[in-house]
C-alpha cells in the first residue's frame, strides 16, 4: 500500500508528458499509414492504366484494396505488394512501366525524414529492379548507377544478403560489357557472402554466371567446374527447369572442349525433358547443338535432321529473333557441308528478318527512351514540388510546435511546483518506509543465506562420510580378499599334487576372489563419489577426453587423497603398478614431476 503511494507521486509528475506522447505518437503513425495507402492506391491506378482490369490483375487489385483499408501495414507486406505490381509489368515485358513505377516508389522512400531499418532495406531492394530494367534495355551505365546506390546502402547498414545480389548483378553488367576481370571480381564477392549464409539459389546464379565468364575466356575446364557447382545447388523437384537448362549449358561446354559424345549425352537428358514439357524456345537451341555435335562426329544424316528440326521450330514459334539466329546457324551448317545455294538462301532470309527486326527495335527503343526520360522528368518535377510543399509545411509546423512547446512548458512548470509543494513530506515518509523495508528484506536474505549454507555444509559432510566409509570398507574388504588369496596359494603349495580335486577347487576359489572387484563395487563407489563430487567426471572428460575408464577411476582415487598403497588394496594391483599408472597419468595430464597430482586435480578439475 505504501509503495503504491510512491508510484502515485511519480506518476503525477509524468502525467503531462504521457499526455503529450499519447496525443502525438498516434498522429505520426496515422501519417505513415496514410502515405503507404496513397502509394498503394497509386500502384493500383498505374497497373490499371498499363495493363487494364482482367483475370490476371483482379486478384492483385483485391490484395491492394485489403492493404489500403488496413490500419497497420507492415513494411514487409507493403514491399511485397509493390513488387507484385512490378511482376505484372515484367510478365508483359513492359520494362518502361517497371522503371516509371520504381522511380516513383524510390522517390517516396527518399523523402522519408528518419527511415527505419526496414524502410532502408526496402529502398535498397527497390533500387535493384531499377538497375535490372535498365540493364535489359542495354543502358548499362544507368543500371550501374542504381546498383551502386543500392550497394552504398547495403554496405552502410550491413545488408549482406542484399549486397550479394548487387555484386551478382554488377558482375553480369561487366560480363555483358566484356569486362571479364571485373565481372569475376564481383561474382566471387557474391559467392563469398552466399557461401557463408548457405543461400543455394543465389549460389546457383553466381556459379552459373562465373562459368559464362570462363567460357568467354576459353578456359573451359574452369567453366565446367563452376557449371557443375551450379547444378549441385539446385533442388531437382523445385528447380527442375533450371536443372535441365544447366544440362544444355554443360553440353555446350563439352562441345567447346571437343568431347562431342559427352555433349550429346547431356543434350539427350535436356531434350527429353524439353520435348515433354513443350519448352520450344529452349528446344530450338538444343537441336542446334545436337546438329553441331553430330556433324563433328561425322554423322551427317543426324546433323541434318536436327538442323531441320531447329528451323521448323524457329518458324513455328513466330519469334523473329530466334528464327534469324537459327537461319544463320543453318547457313553456317550448309557452308561447312559444301551446300552454297542452301547456305545463301538461309543467310538471305536471316538478313531480311534482321532488317525488319532492326527497324522495329530502333523504333521501339526510341519510344522506350522517350517514355523513360518523360517518366524521370515527371518524377523529378514531382520531387521538387513535394520538397517545396514539405518545406512550407515544416516552417508552419515549426512555428506551431514552438508556440505549443512554450505553452506546454509553462503548464508543466506550474503543475510541477504544485505537486512539489504538496508531496514533499509524503515523499520523505515514503523514502523512510522504503529504507526500513529494504533493511528488513536484507536481514531476512542474510538469515536465509546462512541457513542454506549450513544445510549445504551438513549435506556435504554427510556425503563425505558416506564416501569415506565406503572407501575404507572397500580397502578392508579387498585386504581381506588379498589375505585369503595368499593363504589359499600357500595351501595350494602344501597340498599333495595328487589331490587334484581339492587343488582344482582351490584354483576356482582363487579365480572367484580375483574377480571380486567387479562392476558392482565400482558402481557403488561411483555412486557415492558423484554425490560428493557431482561435476568431477564431467569436467575431467571435457578437459581430457582421451582418458580411459581406469585412468578416470585413478583420478577419482587421487581426488580423495588415497595413497598408492590404499589404491593398490582397492584395485588388487601391486604398489609398483599403481605408481607406474600414476606416472602415465601424469604424462597424459601434462603435469611436471614437481607438481602434486592430487592438488592439481582438486584445484583444476573438482
Image (cartoon, helix red, strand yellow):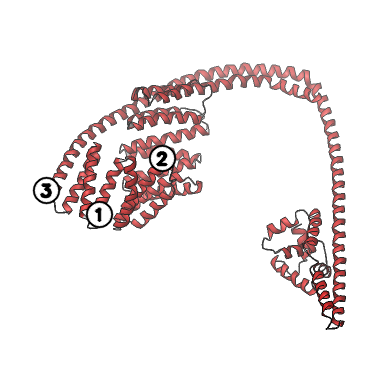
Q: Residues within 10 Å of mark 2 (few under 14, many from 20)?
A: some
- Nearer the observer: mark 2 or 1; the answer is 1
Report the side of 253 relative to 437 (left or right).
left
Q: Are marks 3 and 1 in contact (CB under 8 Å)?
A: no
Count of numbered marks: 3
> Of the residues under marks 3 and 1, which one precedes in the sequence?
1
Q: Please state the horizontal and vertical placement of residue 257, each as a whole percent of the image.
A: 30, 57
> Of the residues under marks 2 and 1, which one precedes in the sequence?
2
Rounded to the nearest whole Å, what is the CA distance between mark 3 and mark 2?
Answer: 52 Å
Q: Which residue is mark 2?
A: 148
Q: Which residue is mark 1?
A: 294
Residue 341: give its label: 3
Q: Please state the horizontal and vertical placement of residue 181, each as a whole percent of the image.
A: 36, 51
Q: Are marks 3 and 2 in contact (CB under 8 Å)?
A: no
Dot 3 falls on a residue whose secondary structure is: helix
Determine the residue positioned at 72% across, 55% down: 538
Query: Residue 575 falls in which quadrant of the image?
Result: bottom right
Q: Of residues 200 and 574, which is closer to you in this image?
A: 574
Q: Is residue 180 visible?
A: no
Dot 2 falls on a residue whose secondary structure is: helix
Q: Is residue 57 above or below residue 490?
A: above
Q: Please state the horizontal and vertical placement of residue 536, each as a whole percent of the image.
A: 75, 56
Amino acid at each position: 500500500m505504501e509503495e503504491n503511494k510512491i508510484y502515485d507521486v511519480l506518476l503525477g509528475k509524468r502525467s503531462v508528458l504521457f499526455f503529450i506522447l499519447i496525443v502525438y505518437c498516434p498522429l505520426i503513425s496515422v501519417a505513415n499509414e496514410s502515405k503507404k495507402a496513397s502509394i498503394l492506391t497509386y500502384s493500383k491506378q498505374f497497373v490499371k492504366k498499363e495493363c487494364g482490369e482482367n483475370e490476371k490483375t483482379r486478384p492483385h487489385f483485391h490484395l491492394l484494396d485489403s492493404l489500403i483499408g488496413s490500419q497497420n501495414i507492415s513494411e514487409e507486406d507493403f514491399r511485397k505488394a509493390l513488387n507484385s505490381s512490378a511482376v505484372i509489368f515484367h510478365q508483359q515485358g513492359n520494362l518502361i512501366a517497371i522503371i516509371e513505377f520504381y522511380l516513383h516508389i524510390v522517390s517516396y522512400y527518399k523523402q522519408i525524414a528518419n527511415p527505419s531499418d526496414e524502410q532502408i532495406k526496402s529502398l535498397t531492394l527497390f533500387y535493384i529492379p531499377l538497375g535490372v530494367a535498365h540493364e535489359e534495355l542495354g543502358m548499362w551505365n544507368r543500371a550501374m548507377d542504381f546498383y551502386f546506390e543500392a550497394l552504398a546502402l547495403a554496405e552502410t547498414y550491413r545488408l549482406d544478403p542484399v549486397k550479394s545480389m548487387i555484386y551478382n548483378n554488377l558482375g553480369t553488367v561487366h560480363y555483358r560489357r566484356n569486362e571479364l576481370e571485373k565481372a569475376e571480381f564481383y561474382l566471387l564477392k557474391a559467392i563469398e557472402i552466399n557461401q557463408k549464409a548457405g543461400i543455394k539459389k543465389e549460389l546457383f546464379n553466381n556459379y552459373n554466371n562465373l562459368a559464362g565468364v570462363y567460357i568467354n575466356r576459353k578456359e573451359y575446364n574452369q567453366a565446367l567446374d563452376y557449371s557443375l557447382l551450379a547444378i549441385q545447388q539446385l533442388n531437382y523437384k523445385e528447380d527442375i527447369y533450371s536443372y535441365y537448362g544447366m544440362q544444355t549449358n554443360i553440353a555446350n561446354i563439352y562441345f567447346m572442349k571437343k568431347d562431342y559424345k559427352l555433349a550429346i549425352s547431356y543434350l539427350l537428358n535436356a531434350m527429353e525433358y524439353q520435348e515433354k514439357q513443350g519448352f520450344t524456345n529452349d528446344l530450338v537451341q538444343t537441336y542446334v547443338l545436337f546438329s553441331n555435335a553430330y556433324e563433328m562426329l561425322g554423322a551427317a544424316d543426324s546433323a541434318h535432321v536436327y538442323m531441320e528440326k531447329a528451323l521448323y521450330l524457329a518458324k513455328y514459334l513466330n519469334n523473329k529473333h530466334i528464327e534469324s539466329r537459327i537461319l544463320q546457324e543453318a547457313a553456317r551448317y550448309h557452308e561447312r557441308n559444301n551446300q552454297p545455294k542452301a547456305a545463301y538462301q538461309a543467310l538471305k532470309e536471316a538478313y531480311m528478318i534482321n532488317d525488319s527486326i532492326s527497324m522495329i527495335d530502333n523504333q521501339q527503343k526510341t519510344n522506350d527512351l522517350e517514355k523513360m526520360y518523360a517518366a524521370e522528368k515527371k518524377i523529378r518535377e514531382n520531387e521538387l514540388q513535394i520538397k517545396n510543399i514539405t518545406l512550407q509545411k515544416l516552417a508552419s509546423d515549426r512555428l506551431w510546435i514552438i508556440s505549443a512547446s512554450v505553452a506546454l512548458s509553462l503548464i508543466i512548470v506550474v503543475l510541477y511546483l504544485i505537486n512539489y509543494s504538496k508531496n514533499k513530506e509524503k515523499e520523505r515518509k515514503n523514502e523512510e518506509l522504503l529504507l526500513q523495508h529494504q533493511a528488513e528484506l536484507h536481514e531476512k536474505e542474510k538469515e536465509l543465506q546462512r541457513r542454506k549454507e549450513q544445510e549445504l555444509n551438513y549435506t556435504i559432510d554427510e556425503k563425505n562420510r558416506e564416501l569415506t566409509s565406503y572407501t575404507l570398507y572397500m580397502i578392508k574388504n579387498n585386504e581381506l580378499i588379498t589375505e585369503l588369496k595368499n593363504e589359499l596359494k600357500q595351501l595350494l603349495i602344501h597340498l599333495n599334487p595328487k589331490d587334484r580335486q581339492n587343488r582344482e577347487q582351490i584354483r576356482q576359489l582363487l579365480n572367484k576372489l580375483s574377480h571380486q572387484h567387479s562392476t558392482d563395487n565400482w558402481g557403488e563407489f561411483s555412486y557415492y563419489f558423484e554425490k560428493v563430487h557431482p561435476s568431477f567426471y564431467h569436467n575431467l572428460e571435457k578437459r581430457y577426453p582421451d582418458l580411459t575408464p581406469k585412468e578416470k577411476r585413478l583420478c577419482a582415487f587421487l581426488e580423495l587423497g588415497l595413497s598408492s598403497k590404499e589404491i593398490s588394496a582397492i584395485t588388487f594391483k601391486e604398489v609398483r603398478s599403481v605408481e607406474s599408472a600414476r606416472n602415465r597419468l601424469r604424462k597424459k595430464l601434462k603435469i611436471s614431476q614437481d607438481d602434486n597430482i592430487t592438488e592439481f586435480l582438486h584445484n583444476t578439475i573438482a
